[in-house]
Image (tube, rainbow, N blue to C red):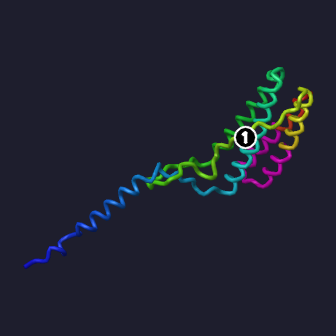
């Protein structure tokens, strides 16, 4: 007589395996995998976050003082282009095949900035922007000194642009 147990998996192991597969399939959306960032990529992400805050200051100033839109709008657009250039240096998160309960990485590359407070007079608001541009230009120069060649060139260009903005933004 032949033993049936040695012929393949038992019904119990098949049911247990199927149950595990069902549980794994129902745990949520695909896990977003963010590749490990290099030092330059972390620096680019940090600079992008800082410039996003500066762009938010421009947006808040324009919203509070619509008469400044003509002068400040193009400068704000340049900051948005700077952020795009820095984010382009970062690897895109990829969805893995393994399910997870979370779909957003902790190191997000698309920063969001809350609107900073804006001075009540247009002249004071614009003066605050000029001061922020000077600070940002100095910060970018320091970052460029620590960056690799490709990122250093980009950060130096952004620093120069921010320095020019500090001169162009006049109350």
| Residue sitting at the far left | 1
Residue 103 in the image: state x and y as whole percent: 53, 49
Q: Nearer the viewer, residue 157 or 110?
A: 110
- Residue at 60% x, 57% y is 36
Number of labels in the image equals: 1
When the figure is inspected, residue 147 is found, relative to residue 87, above or below; the finding is below
The chief SS type of the magenta part is helix
Q: Is residue 22 above or below residue 63?
A: below
- Range of the magenta residues? 137-161
Residue 100 vs residue 78, the one in the foreground: 100
Quarter holding the C terminus?
Answer: top right
Residue farthest toward the bottom in the current orientation of the protein? 1
User: Residue 9 location in percent, x, y?
Assistant: 23, 69
Q: Residue at x 86, y 35 (%)?
A: 129
Q: Give SS at disc 1.
A: loop
Residue positioned 57% across, 48% down in the render: 104
| Residue at numbered disc 1 | 113
């Amino acid at each position: 007589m032949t033993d049936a147990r040695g012929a393949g998996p038992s019904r119990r192991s098949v049911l247990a395996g199927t149950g595990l597969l069902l549980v794994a399939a129902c745990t949520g959306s695909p896990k977003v995998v963010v590749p490990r960032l290099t030092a330059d990529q972390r620096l680019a992400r940090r600079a992008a976050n800082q410039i996003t805050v500066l762009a938010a200051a421009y947006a808040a100033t324009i919203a509070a003082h619509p008469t400044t839109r003509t002068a400040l709008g193009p400068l704000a657009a340049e900051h948005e282009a700077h952020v795009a250039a820095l984010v382009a240096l970062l690897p895109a998160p990829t969805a893995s095949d393994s399910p997870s309960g979370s779909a957003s990485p902790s190191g997000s590359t698309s920063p969001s900035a809350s609107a900073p407070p804006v001075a009540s007079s247009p002249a004071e608001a614009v003066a605050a922007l000029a001061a922020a541009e000077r600070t940002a230009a100095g910060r970018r120069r320091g970052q460029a000194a620590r960056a690799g060649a490709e990122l250093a060139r980009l950060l130096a260009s952004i620093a120069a642009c921010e320095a020019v903005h500090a001169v162009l933004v006049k109350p």
